[in-house]
Image (cartoon, rainbow, N blue to C red):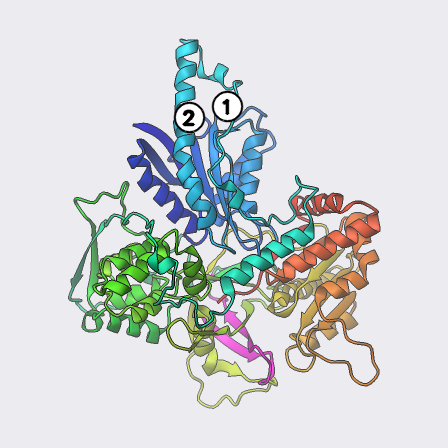
Amino acid sequence: MRRFLLLYATQKGQAKAIAEEICEKAFAHGFSADLHCISESDKYDLKTETAPLVVVVSTTGTGDPPDTARKFVKAIQDKALPADFFAHLHYGLLGLGDSEYTYFCNGGKIIDKRLQELGAQHFYDTGHADDCVGLELVVEPWIDGLWAALTKHFMASRGKEERNGALKMASNASQRMDPVKPELLHIESQVELLRLDDPGRKDSEVREQNTVNRNQSSAPPAESESSLTHSIPPLSQASLNIPALPPEYLQVHLQESLGQEESQASVISVDPIFQVPISKAVQLTTDDAIKTTLLVELDISKTDFSYQPGDAFNVICPNSDSEVQNLLQRLQLTDRREHCVLLKIKADTKKKGAALPQHIPEGCSLQFILTWCLEIRAVPKKALLRALSDYTSDGPEKRRLQELCSRQGAADYNRLVRDAHASLFDLLLAFPSCQPPLRLLLEHLPKLQPRPYSCASSNLTHPGKLHFIFNIVEFVSNTTMEVLRKGVCTGWLATVAASVLHPYPRVSRAEGGKAPAPEISISPRTTNFFHLPSDPSAPIIMVGPGTGIAPFIGFLQHREKLQEQHPDGHFGAMWLFFGCRHKDRDYLFREELRHFHQRGILTHLKVSFSRDAPVGEEEAPVKYVQDNIRLHSEQVARLLLHERGCIYICGDAKNMAKDVSDTLVEIISKEAGVEKLEAMKTLATLKEEKRLLFKCSEHV
């Protein structure tokens, strides 16, 4: 059997699922895949690897490789490595991304570029799959073409051995093979923002393509269009190419519980978990604001949890209790919700390398697992739809599920499942004859991920305390019926913090009989780069509309204390570009920012209000943070290009960060008098030098 090494770097399980699909299909094509997470460096060694390498890499919202790849990327970016370090390595790479974010597929691009710099050679062209239009548009043809590329590689390698006899493999590395191009790669995403190797590409083409793709996937259905449960020709009459049924691998037994107590401590985490009380919660917005923003203060004084301003941490959250009960009822398992779930690997499973899901703790109740361990709100993957179809007795319902997971039904899947944020429960409501076993859910539902939040305080100002802020996320789901849902974590946090909440405006609560402080579980995030410069004299620009201001409150508190401690020190200028909808409704930390500005800690405060109309004859207010940045283009360019300044951007990674990046390119081009491509390269250099840093602020 011809062996290849298959690595995946995943953040939320997408890359892992695709790598597992490749692994499953390999056997049928005469190959054996050695599958590992890229973080499992003890299980593979690229320095001595002679088999071809296949890598599937996702990208975080800020354009970085996923957390699981950080150690690997740091190792290969060692500048001491020689240029031929990986000259023996032949590889193919599939990058996953979303072109609505600024740095599309950048996680894969970083690894791809560095492997090339170290002498590795492509045996198969890189694929960039775009979640904005549907990953499968690139993933499926890329996988289909992989087998021919591997076959060609093995045949060429065997030919070389036969020609060269006893010559060492290393002497063959200089004979470069042309990479095989994946079939239909022209449908790869059209959007590669900040792409440095294509000066001829027009921005208008990028925007037009993105608009077309978005309109195709999210336009509301007309009456003659398909719905979640109903298709129309030609799909309803088409022969379908449906994916292979994922092999079963779990054996599930429900055993009556002995009544043992369960707690959040049972949740499996690679990082230490701290149970901390909520000492205070404050509503930062008025009741008529479009979004409700809360500040929560955690008491960490009795723990060894530590943080720096700019750090993020994880909140371990449960699924909504009502949604868990609804799912149990639909599965007809309500009367067994307290039973212990015992898992074993099926003895006759055909799944290669089958292992028990690491995120499901041993011996916990079914209700606990559905509440704390599984992402029941996750958008069902096509593999799950395929498996559900086999447990659907009604003919038209079975056919519709097959359509939604088929290649021909990709557009319907994107519009009616992915873009509609349908959940497993939504599908079970829509297809009442579908009666899946519990095993299927445990095999397919991903881990309930902890939600990251930025620290919004400095431990110098608030010793023993940790602040963070969030919007209570609300959205309407209408996959089967119109339902108002709250974010998994933000909805839960708002409920937990209600007993200690100070409403807007901030008034002291009557103490009365004080209830015990509610507690939540948090864990540190091990990879944090969003810190103040080590040189305090370096000027900094902070861009943080909405809740994106959170880390900058920590920066300002920290800088104020440092300036008090070192009155003769030299501290660089601090600019803040903040934005919100209305000056009188959601201007977060208004008094605090005024205080920092008056004290000279914050040297420049520029605020924009996107929904406020001009009053009387005054000029129309600046609407967005990028407009304010453009108004101060000369100073911004000087700080970044001539004074070694740093710029920090925190907020909506899809829209705001892209708009700010575009504005910075425009400013650098204008102020430095260079072409746009050169300005893009300058921006990329700032990112490499860690002088341009991004952070996402929105978490549900």
Task: Please say if 506 is above or below 411.
Answer: below
Task: Please say if 259 is above or below 150.
Answer: below
The region drawn magenta spans 277-303
Camera-side residue of 88 and 567: 88
Report whether 466 appears left or right of 691: left
Report whether 452 appears left or right of 231: right
- Label 1: how many Cα within 10 Å (few below 14, some 14–19, many 20+): some
From the top left corner, tell me how far across and down residue 33 is, in percent: 34, 35
Query: In the rendering, which numbered label is found on residue 152?
Result: 2
From the top left corner, tell me how far across and down residue 346 is, in percent: 19, 48
Camera-side residue of 613 and 188: 188
Whether the magenta-drawn stretch holds residue 283 is answered as: yes
Q: Amino acid at mark 1?
A: Met
Query: In the rendering, which numbered label is found on residue 325?
Result: none
Q: Amino acid at mark 2?
A: Lys
Q: Residue at x 58, y 36 (%)?
A: 113
Res. 633 visible in picture:
yes
Tag 2, which secondary structure? helix
From the top left corner, tell me how far across and down residue 635 is, in percent: 82, 57
**Residue at the disc numbered 1:** 177
Camera-side residue of 77 and 461: 77
- Label 2: how many Cα within 10 Å (few below 14, some 14–19, many 20+): some
Whether the magenta-drawn stretch holds residue 576 is answered as: no
Question: Mark 1 and 2 residues: CB-CB less than 8 Å, in contact?
Answer: yes
Res. 263 visible in picture:
no
Q: Residue at x 40, y 39 (%)?
A: 144
Q: Residue at x 34, y 65 (%)?
A: 424
- Name the quadrant containing residue 292: bottom right
Task: Please say if 240 is above or below 288.
Answer: above
- Name the quadrant containing residue 294: bottom right
